[in-house]
Amino acid sequence: MAIAVLMSTAATAQESESVETTIAADVVNQYIWRGVDAGNVSLQPTLGVAYKGLSLTAWGSVGLSESSDTKEFDFTLGYTTGGLNVGITDYWFSVGQDPDARYFKYDAHGTNHVFEAFVGYDFGVVSAQWYTNFAGNDGVNKDGKRAYSSYFEVNAPFRLATCEWTATLGAVPYATTTYGTTGFAVTNIGLKATKDIKVTDTFSIPVFAGVIGNPCAQKAYLVFGFTLKP
């Protein structure tokens, strides 16, 4: 019995120290980001690697129904230990057919990159996350100065019937044109359900739907999508 336990522990340790790769893609009927309308029908691929809590993830979004939708390409470098996670995201946006939307343009006053730092903690029953833009093409505040746009979000996962659910509450602490706020504002109230649809004995497709409200913008959305992954 002791030998079996030791072998199991060793196997678990070996698995945790191996490099993990993520390959996936979401298809959504509309792209809603933190309560903000960011596009219509979209394809959103993900490619990531992780090792011992350190991860590097590439994520993108491209409109499938409207050519004028913003194209997005992000890199996130993160580290997780226990319930704590920290990291930096480099967002890049190409609006419409803007000829100056060059990826490798890092001019402080003309780049389409936004750099954001984040920190969060997962308490199990609930998780909390804080995000702040610290460089790049950030929004401005009421005085026309860099806003260092920030966003705070709390998520509570739970299981109901045969679905995995998540309740979300997100807010912007102060004025910024990035989120269209003039002060503290609740911008994201959501409830999302996810369920795996079995296709074969070895393959299933996660399907999700969510109701999202933005009290600040007086907007509400019903989002539906599915995830493809090996």
Image (spheres, rainbow, N blue to C red):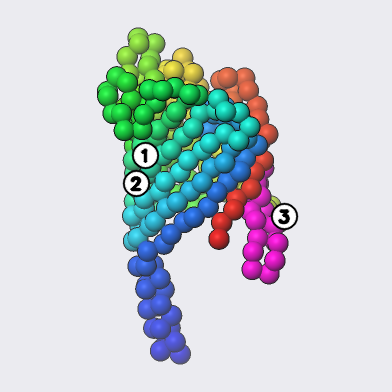
Q: Tell me the element at label 3.
A: loop
Q: Are marks 1 and 2 in contact (CB under 8 Å)?
A: yes
Of circles 2 and 3, which is in front? 2
Magenta-highlighted stretch: main secondary structure?
A: strand
Identified by mark 1, the residue type is Thr
The x, y position of residue 168, in whole percent, is 56, 38
Residue 43 sits above or below residue 3 on the image: above
Contact? badges 2 and 3 (CB < 8 Å): no
Check the picture and name the quadrant holding the N terminus: bottom left
Callout 2: few (<14), some (14-19), or many (20+) C-alpha neighbours within 10 Å? Answer: some
Disc number for residue 77? 2
Name the residue: 40% across, 33% down.
Answer: 92
User: What residue is at 37 percent from the left and 67 percent from the top?
Assistant: 18
**Mark 3 in CB contact with mark 1 (< 8 angstroms):** no
Residues rendered magenta in the picture: 190-210
Q: Secondary structure at mark 2?
A: strand
User: Could you tell which of marks 2 and 3 lies nearer the N-terminus?
Assistant: 2
Is residue 227 shown to the viewer in this render?
yes
Which of the 4 quarters of the picture holds residue 196? bottom right
Residue under label 3, please give it.
161
